[in-house]
Amino acid sequence: MGAAEAMARLRAAATTEPGKLRIVGAVLAALVIAFGAVTAMEVSDRAAAADDVVSRSQPLSADAALVYRSLADADTAASSGFLAGAAAEPRAVRDRYEKDITLASRLLVKAATHTDADSESGLQIRRLNEQLPVYTGYVETARSYNRQGKPLGGAYLRFANERMTKVLLPAAQKLYDAETARLDRDDDAATAWPLFALLAGVVALGALGVAQRRNYLRTNRVFNQGLLAATAASTVLLLWLVAAHTVASSQLGEARTSGQNSLQALNEARIGSLKARANENLVLVARGAVLTDDGKNDKYETEYRENMGVLADALGRAHRLADDARGTAPLDAAAKSLDTWQTRHEQAGRTDRAGDYEGALTKVIGGKGSTGESFDEVDAALDRALAHEQREFTRAAENGRGAFGLLPVGAAGLGVLAALGAVLGINRRLSEYR
């Protein structure tokens, strides 16, 4: 029998009711199998993106923020230790500086292992690794001259601060921006609607509805158990898909708005606080020797005020984003300590302008009642707020990831079950022609 004759027989068979039923059965089986397969693939992609949010991109973004904070805190500790004098430098201050540098170095090594060397993050990591030893070298030189009582130590400390503010911190900011952008991309991928799966589900259910209507019109039977089972399995899968994606999107959206955005505001607040504290110390280190570009104001006092403004603004945004008492309580405490800090700073400034440098020094780096005490209170409160918002982010993001759960496996299983039901339902009709 030739190919032409075989095609003629197939066309003839397709004009009979059994032939039409076989075509209907094959189309239905293909549609529900495609629905299950597309759902499994799209949901797997979104589950992988949600897993990246929880286990890769958000931790890397948090680490990048911690690199920035560690560097800024190291600069603050270096200036505080210098003001105390090399011989009187508190061990705790020195330990804090060394801990910050060690932490930043360790986090950069960790980030490098998870980053493409040719990416923006890789470029900034190399820059930070190259420039960090330059900065620490300036700090050690400043300490050495300070130990000898030579004024040149102050110049080297200013060199160190300039290296930090103009090279290291901008590179750390770019690293944080790059990792946060990666987090946003993963979040967008996880919450994107699975349009192909939804379309496949609607088409499959539509085809099953048409097939059952056709069956009813030809047999006057309301139900075909096989087609009904296929419809039920496809409906369950479509509803599961919509519900899972809705829950995942809601939880991941909460993680972004109430978690990630809050963390970003808190990081800005803490960085503003650290930079303001370093500027405050450098006001006394430079003693008016460094002016703004227009030559009218003390450079470090001006930058102190700018960074205190950043701190106050970021605190306000973080407070608006906080959605429970555990989130707002540490922010209220930070705002109260901020007000005290500003008052004490003004008092220290008046003392310094009156010619009492030692008195001003005590008001800045002394113990109880100093601006240093207020700074520590602000820093501790922000640390508590950051820890709370990080827990909130992790909880919501993990809930979002968990919403996908067994859906990829369930989609494959329900797709096969629906196909089996469709085939059995059609076969039951075919048996009536034998």
Image (cartoon, rainbow, N blue to C red):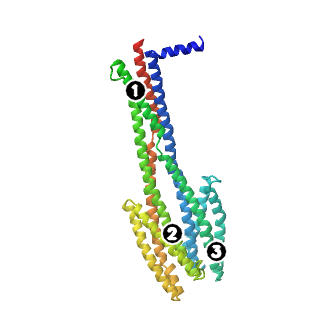
Q: How many callouts does the rendering have?
A: 3
Q: Which of 188 and 330 lies nearest the eye of the viewer? A: 188
In the current view of this chain or complex, which residue is farthest to the bottom? 355
- Label 3 element class: helix
| Residue 391 seen in the figure | no
| On-image quarter of the N terminus | top right
Measured from the top left, where is residue 332 in percent x and y? Answer: 39, 68
Q: Residue drawn at (49%, 46%), measured in percent from left and top?
A: 190
x 56%, y 68%: residue:
72
Which kind of residue does numbered mark 1 sit on?
Val
Task: Judge whether residue 340 can be spotted in this image.
Answer: yes
Q: What is the quadrant of residue 334 in the picture?
A: bottom left
From the top left corner, tell me how far across and down residue 20 is, in percent: 45, 19
Q: Which residue is mark 1?
A: 210
Q: Quadrant where the C terminus lies?
A: top left
Helix, strand or loop at label 2? It is: helix
- Look at label 3 and name its amino acid: Phe
| Mark found first going from the N terminus, 2 or 1 | 1
Residue at disc 1, secondary structure: helix
Q: Which residue is mark 2?
A: 272
Numbered disc in front, either 2 or 1:
1
Estimate how packed mark 1 is, as few (under 14), some (14 to 19) or many (20 or more) residues with alpha carbons within 10 Å.
few
The residue pinned by badge 3 equals 159
Q: Is residue 313 above or below residue 9?
A: below
Give the residue type at disc 2.
Gly
Of labels 1 and 3, earlier in sequence is: 3
Q: CA distance from mark 1 to mark 3?
A: 78 Å
The mark nearer the N terminus, 3 or 2, is: 3
